[in-house]
Structures are given as C-alpha cells and as structure tokens.
Image: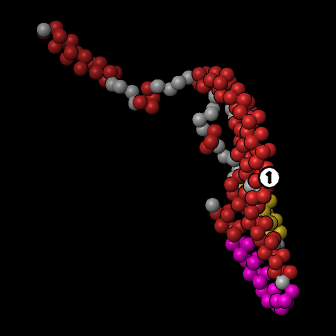
Amino acid sequence: MKRFFLGLSLLWAGGGQSLQAEAPSDYFAPPEAMYSFADFWVVRPLDLAVLPLTATTWVASLPVTAASGTSDQAYDLLIRQLTQHMMKRPLGQFWDWENRDQSRPVVIKFTDGYSMAELSPEQERKYRRALQEHEERILAIERAEEVPQKDRDALARGEERRWENVVRLLLSL
C-alpha cells in the first residue's frame, strides 16, 4: 500500500504535467491522404455520374427558366457549380469548397462611363436584372410622347440618379 501512494505521489510531483489531455481539436486530425483518396475514388466519380442527370434537367427546364429569365441561374446551379466542384477543386478539399470566393470581374455601366467591380454570382445576377429594368425604364420614358419633353428629361435624370443609387447599394453588399 505504501508503494502505491509513493508511486502516486512521484507521478503527481514529477510527471503529472505530461498526463494532461489534449484539446479535442488537436486530438484527432484525419490525414489529408484519406480525404484525397475518398475525393478521387468516391466524390469525383459521383460528380461525374450526376452531371448527365443535371444537364438533362437543365435542358428540360429551359422553357420554364427562359420564360422567367432564370436560365443563367439554373445553369450556374445545375452545371457550372457541379463541373467546378469536380474539376477546379483541389484534391481532398471538398469541405471548404462552398465557402470559396466566387467573385469575378464585371463591367459596371454608369451614365458617364464604365467601371470594373468584383461581384459574386448572386451580385452579378442582381446587377444584370437591375440593368435590364433600368434600360426598360429609360425606353418607357423615351416612348412616352404625350409627356412634354421637359418632363421626360426630368424623369430621365431621376431614373439615372435612381440607377446610380442602385449600383452603389449593390456594390456595398
């Protein structure tokens, strides 16, 4: 019994520090080779197998998406994102793929010129939709011949100010 307490006291006095448990985040980190193996032999072949189904779905949905103006969004969702997940993604890194930066350069139209901006796909879709609405509004103002020219000019200036505010708001998001 004395030996037990002596051993326990020595362990506590000298080596007790090295018996502390590691934090859970440092305790288990699977090797990157395991993720790379699973990615190459399981995830990418599944992506390749699903691609014809999603492409067929996109083609079948074209009448509906073209009518609603969302065919680009459907293409991005069903084909572009899947092919990028399969081909552009680094091997073994499928967990952080959704959090990647997807922004790309887009030319922004202003009344006095153009500018470049880095927009995410969602921001780009919103910009394209807003630009189309802006152009339709300007055309409607120009076609309104019953409205005096002075009032049409004032409406056009107001629409240009509204457009600049929309672009500023879009770029601030």
Q: Is residue 35 visible?
A: yes
Q: Relative to 75, say whether 151 is above or below.
A: below
Which residue type does callout 1 highlight? Pro
Q: Quadrant of the N terminus?
A: top left
Horizontal side of 54 relative to 146 (left or right) equals left
Horizontal side of 147 relative to 126 (left or right) equals right
Residue visible at 33% across and 25% down?
20
Q: Position of residue 12 (x, y in %)?
A: 24, 20
Horizontal side of 31 relative to 74 (left or right) equals left
Does residue 156 show up magenta in the picture? yes
Horizontal side of 162 relative to 141 (left or right) equals left
Residue visible at 17% across and 10% down?
4
| Quarter holding residue 106 | bottom right
Magenta stretch secondary structure, dominant: helix
SS at mark 1 in the image: helix
Residue 112 or 141: which is nearer the viewer? 141
Q: Relative to 55, say whether 155 is above or below.
A: below
Q: Position of residue 50 (x, y in %)?
A: 71, 33
Residue 157 or 125: which is nearer the viewer? 125
Q: Is residue 116 visible?
A: no
Q: Which residue is mark 1?
A: 63
Q: Position of residue 2 (x, y in %)?
A: 13, 9
Q: Quadrant of the C terminus?
A: bottom right
| Quarter holding residue 168 | bottom right
State the extent of the magenta-drawn residues as a range. Answer: 145-165
Residue visible at 69% across and 57% down?
123
Does residue 160 show up magenta in the picture? yes
Residue visible at 73% across and 49% down?
74
Q: Relative to 118, say whether 108 is above or below.
A: below
Q: Position of residue 35 (x, y in %)?
A: 60, 25
Q: Relative to 58, say whether 169 is above or below.
A: below
Residue 116 or 135: which is nearer the viewer? 135
